[in-house]
Image (cartoon, grey):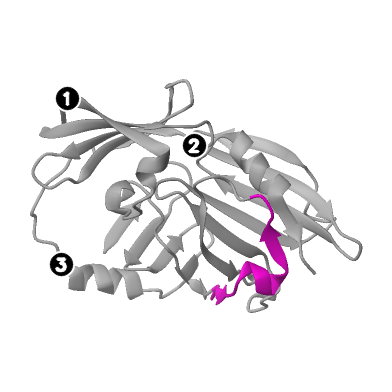
Amino acid sequence: MERVESLSGQPRSTFRRNDQVITFLPGSRTAVSERRESLGLFPDLLRATDSSIGQHYSAHQRGVERVAGLDADVVQLQPKDKLRFGYRIWSEKATGLVMKLQTLDVDGRVLEQAAFSELQMDVPVSVAKLTQMMENTDGYRVEKPEMVKTTAAAEGWAIKNPVAGFKPMSCQRRPTLGADQGKTDGAMQWVFSDGLASVSVFVEVFDRSKHTVEGSMALGATQTLTRRMGDKNTDWWLTIIGEVPRSTLAAFAQGLERTR
């Protein structure tokens, strides 16, 4: 169970109990309750059990350093190709908890960093109190975008040229929020992972009123690509997001094809 408070930008409080997540947005008095998979977010990066990670990354010890007053082993994960970023990881010596994480570009430069500035281990936590805070939605409009599990094949999509190392993890159809809440004709979200990095492929019917700019952008290590694509019957809007090089997103876009 976790509680995360945003201390910059718009106020936001997020609570997670296993895969159940609720985000409180005080500005709009909205609470978004959903089930969400954890795909390697800090500090859970090393919980992956995918035995193929070693095929795409090599690990190198970088000594011991102190983070938040505690000794941490430093390991660098170097990608073996240019389809993924590298990582430098500080893990607490006694527990293995990831205390600091840097995402590195293909030239080894730091794109993004997350770390604990203060950390108390083995402190008693009141799960009952956190649960009460998580369930207190009085005064908030609660939106529950229930994902519908599906498969890419059932939705009529396939990757004709799989991107090396990235395996499909899940596929869901996201319902529309707001005025059309409850409709299940929203975007399909197809998630891929190589055991460390993840890529989400969103596909939805093209809407001229909201899908206007094709291209790519970067925010730290997170890359986004948007593109309009069509077949003989329908135009589609493609959005691909992941903490991977832009060329990797392009490979997913080029490999995606309509099967029906």
Determine the CA span between mark 3 and mark 1: 36 Å
**Amino acid on which disc 3 is placed:** Ser
Whole-percent x, y for residue 42 in the image? 33, 46
Question: Hey, which residue is sitting farthest bottom in the picture?
Answer: 182
Identify which residue is drawn at 56% across, 34% down: 245
Compared with residue 58, is residue 197 higher up or lower down, i.e. above or below?
below
Identify which residue is drawn at 87% across, 64% down: 234
Magenta-colored stretch includes residue 41: no
Q: Which of marks 3 and 1 is in front?
A: 1
Using residue 16 as the reference point, say whether residue 62 is left or right of it: left
Query: Crowding near pointer 3: few (<14 within 10 Å), some, many (20+)?
Result: few
Q: Give the range drawn in magenta.
A: 145-161
Q: Which of marks 1 and 2 is nearer the N terminus?
A: 1
- Residue at the disc numbered 3: 126
- Residue at the disc numbered 1: 63
Query: Crowding near pointer 1: few (<14 within 10 Å), some, many (20+)?
Result: few
Do we see residue 119 in this rendering? Answer: yes
